[in-house]
Image: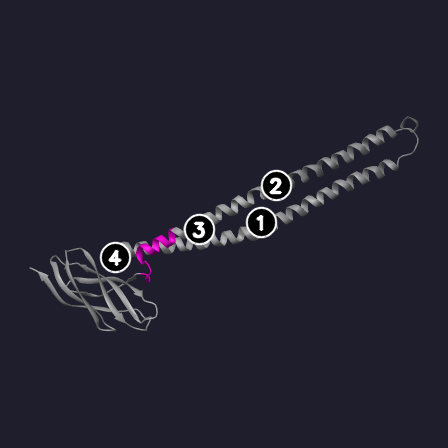
C-alpha cells in the first residue's frame, strides 16, 4: 500500500513537471506569435512596396523611348516588348513572394487563437489531474514521506504524512505500519521519538499494512522519527 501511495506521489511530480513544461510552451507561444505576425506583416509591406516600385520603373522605362510611333522607329516594337516582358517577370516573382507571405500570415493569424486556447486547455487539464493525484495521496496534508530502517520483529514503519492545523502547533501524523512477519500482529505501540507521543495499532494480517494516527504538538518543521515497541502476536 505505502509503495503504491509513494508511486502515485511520484506520478504526481511527473505531472507537475509536465504542467510546468506546457506552461513554458504557452508563454513561448504567447511571446512568439506577435513577433511572427509582426515579421510577416513587415515582409508583406516590403513586397507591396516593391510591387509599386516595379510598376513605377516600368513607366519610366517606357517614357525613355522616343515619342514617335513604334512603326516610325526601327526596333522600337521589339524594345517595348523586351521592357514589358522584363517587368512582367519581375512583377510575377514579386507577386509570388507576396502571396506566399500573405498566405502564411493568414494561417498564423487564423490558427493563433485556437492554438493558444488548446494549449491553455491542456495546461488546465494537467493542473486538474495533478491536483487529483496529490489529493489522492495527501488531501490537505503534507506529501507522504518514506521511512526506512524502522523495523522491530518484522513489524515496519514504511511511510507517514502529517496534517497541520491552522493557528495551533498540533499536528496529526498518519503512519503506515506493515506486518512482514508470518504471524498476525495483535498490537504494537507506534512512538514518535521527538515528542514521545504514541498510539497503539491493532490486528494486522501477515503482509498487510495499516494506518495509525498520532497527535503531536510541535512547532518544528523537521521530519519526524519513529520507533515500535510492545509488539504482541497472536499465536
Sequence-first tag of 2 and 4? 4
Within 10 Å of disc 4 (Cα), the crowding (few <14, some 14-19, many 20+) is many
Q: Is residue 103 above or below residue 155?
A: above
Which image quadrant for residue 217? bottom left
Q: Are marks 3 and 1 in contact (CB under 8 Å)?
A: no
- In magenta stretch: residue 140: yes
| Cα separation between marks 4 and 3 | 29 Å
Give how far across and how far down residue 135 sits, in percent. 33, 56
Q: Which residue is mark 2?
A: 106
Q: Which residue is mark 4?
A: 2
Q: Which residue is mark 1?
A: 33
At 70% from the left and 45% from the top, the residue drawn is: 45
| Cα separation between marks 2 and 3 | 28 Å
At 28% from the left and 55% from the top, the residue drawn is: 5
Q: Main secondary structure of the magenta part?
A: helix
Judge by depth and name the residue closer to the eye, 45 or 135.
Answer: 135
Q: Are marks 4 and 3 in contact (CB under 8 Å)?
A: no
Q: Are marks 2 and 4 in contact (CB under 8 Å)?
A: no
Give how far across and how far down residue 138 sits, in percent. 31, 58
Q: Residue furthest front?
A: 167
Sequence-first tag of 4 and 1? 4
Give how far across and how far down residue 200 sits, in percent. 17, 65
Q: Is residue 168 above or below residue 181?
A: below
User: Which type of secondary structure does the marked residue at label 4 adopt?
Assistant: helix
The residue segment tinted magenta is 129-143
Sequence-first tag of 2 and 3? 2
The colour scheme used to paint the residues is one colour
Sequence-first tag of 3 and 1? 1
Amino acid at each position: 500500500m505505502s509503495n503504491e501511495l509513494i508511486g502515485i506521489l511520484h506520478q504526481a511530480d511527473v505531472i507537475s513537471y509536465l504542467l510546468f513544461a506546457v506552461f513554458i510552451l504557452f508563454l513561448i507561444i504567447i511571446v512568439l506569435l506577435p513577433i511572427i505576425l509582426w515579421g510577416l506583416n513587415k515582409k508583406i509591406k516590403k513586397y507591396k512596396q516593391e510591387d509599386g516600385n516595379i510598376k513605377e520603373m516600368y513607366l519610366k522605362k517606357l517614357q525613355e523611348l522616343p515619342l514617335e510611333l513604334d512603326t516610325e522607329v526601327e526596333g522600337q516594337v521589339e524594345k517595348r516588348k523586351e521592357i514589358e516582358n522584363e517587368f512582367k517577370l519581375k512583377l510575377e516573382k514579386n507577386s509570388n513572394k507576396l502571396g506566399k507571405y500573405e498566405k502564411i500570415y493568414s494561417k498564423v493569424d487564423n490558427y493563433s487563437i485556437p492554438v493558444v486556447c488548446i494549449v491553455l486547455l491542456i495546461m488546465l487539464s494537467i493542473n486538474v489531474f495533478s491536483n487529483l493525484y496529490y489529493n489522492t495521496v495527501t488531501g490537505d496534508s503534507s506529501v507522504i514521506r518514506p521511512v526506512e530502517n524502522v523495523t522491530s520483529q518484522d513489524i515496519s514503519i514504511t511511510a507517514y504524512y502529517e496534517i497541520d492545523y491552522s493557528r495551533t502547533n498540533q499536528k496529526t501524523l498518519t503512519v503506515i505500519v506493515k506486518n512482514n512477519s508470518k504471524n498476525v500482529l495483535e498490537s504494537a505501540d507506534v512512538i514518535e521519538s521527538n515528542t514521545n507521543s504514541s498510539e497503539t495499532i491493532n490486528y494486522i494480517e501477515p503482509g498487510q499494512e495499516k494506518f495509525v494516527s498520532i497527535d503531536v504538538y510541535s512547532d518544528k518543521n523537521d521530519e519526524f522519527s519513529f520507533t515500535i515497541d510492545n509488539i504482541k502476536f497472536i499465536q
